[in-house]
């Protein structure tokens, strides 16, 4: 496996709609290696999700996994995902992106959705997700459509550099329990 170079905002591939992956193409060793490399790259950079356009491949593939404080998400590989919103109540929360390093911003996202996709073996999967999992799916699905989280911010006033995010926006650490 290899750690891939992550492209940053301004690279045209991040603004392209990615191509769907045919079952034959998904079964190819090169595509399976891409998925393995995406998983390794996501872990290397402490991401909770990574979409193929972020590693210069305009293909409809995203990987997701989290065991952080915002919630546990099992390792999920989504190929050709289609999102159906199940609850369009908008919840606002912080997001960051490996392609927009060292920034955070508050982004409204739908509370609950269903995603229909293929797994890495080409099997049809259907996942219902809410909260943080639903947020990450929407973030990655946007990448496959050529969008980034900045496009979803109704107001850029919360766009924050990471040191200022940690200084002004994170809840203060509890001392003495
Ligand atoms: Zn991103």
Image (spheres, rainbow, N blue to C red):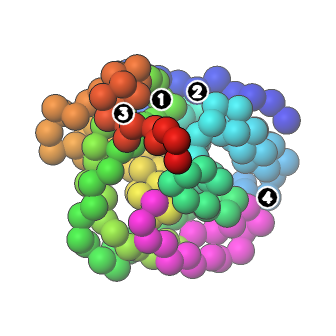
Q: Quadrant of residue 168?
A: top left
Label 4 residue near ligand 1, CB within 8 Å: no
Disc number lying in front (2 or 4): 2
Q: Is residue 161 above or below residue 149?
A: above
Tell me the magenta residue range.
Answer: 117-132
Disc number lying in front (3 or 2): 3
Front residue of this view, candidates 83 and 74: 74
x, y percent for residue 66: 62, 53
Label 2 residue near ligand 1, CB within 8 Å: no
x, y percent for residue 152: 25, 46
Q: Are marks 1 and 2 in contact (CB under 8 Å)?
A: yes
Dot 2 corresponds to which residue? 6
Around disc 2, counting alpha carbons within 10 Å, would you say few (fewer than 14), some (14 to 19), or many (20 or more)? some
Q: Is residue 101 above or below residue 92?
A: above
Label 1 residue near ligand 1, CB within 8 Å: yes
Q: Quadrant of residue 121?
A: bottom right
Q: Which mark is residue 27?
A: 4
x, y percent for residue 83: 42, 68
Dot 3 corresponds to which residue? 104
Element type at mark 1:
loop
Q: Are marks 2 and 4 in contact (CB under 8 Å)?
A: no
Is residue 120 rendered magenta in the image?
Answer: yes
Q: Residue at x 15, y 45 (%)?
A: 154
Element type at mark 3:
strand
Dot 1 corresponds to which residue? 99
3D distance between C-alphas at marks 4 and 1: 28 Å
3D distance between C-alphas at marks 3 and 1: 12 Å
């Amino acid at each position: 496996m290899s750690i891939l170079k992550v492209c940053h905002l301004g690279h045209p591939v991040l603004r392209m709609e990615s191509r769907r992956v045919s079952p034959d193409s998904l079964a190819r060793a090169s595509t399976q290696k891409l998925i393995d490399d995406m998983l390794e790259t996501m872990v290397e950079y402490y991401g909770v999700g990574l979409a193929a356009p972020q590693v210069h491949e305009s293909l409809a593939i995203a990987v997701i996994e989290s065991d952080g404080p915002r919630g546990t998400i099992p390792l999920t590989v989504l190929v050709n995902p289609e999102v159906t919103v199940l609850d369009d109540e908008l919840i606002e929360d912080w997001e960051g992106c490996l392609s927009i390093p060292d920034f955070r911003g508050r982004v409204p996202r739908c509370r609950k959705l269903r995603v229909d996709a293929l797994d890495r073996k080409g099997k049809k999967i259907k996942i219902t997700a809410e909260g943080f999992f639903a947020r990450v799916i929407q973030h990655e699905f946007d990448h496959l459509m050529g969008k980034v989280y900045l496009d979803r911010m109704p107001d850029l006033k919360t766009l924050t550099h990471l040191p200022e995010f940690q200084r002004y926006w994170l809840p203060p650490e509890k001392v003495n329990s």
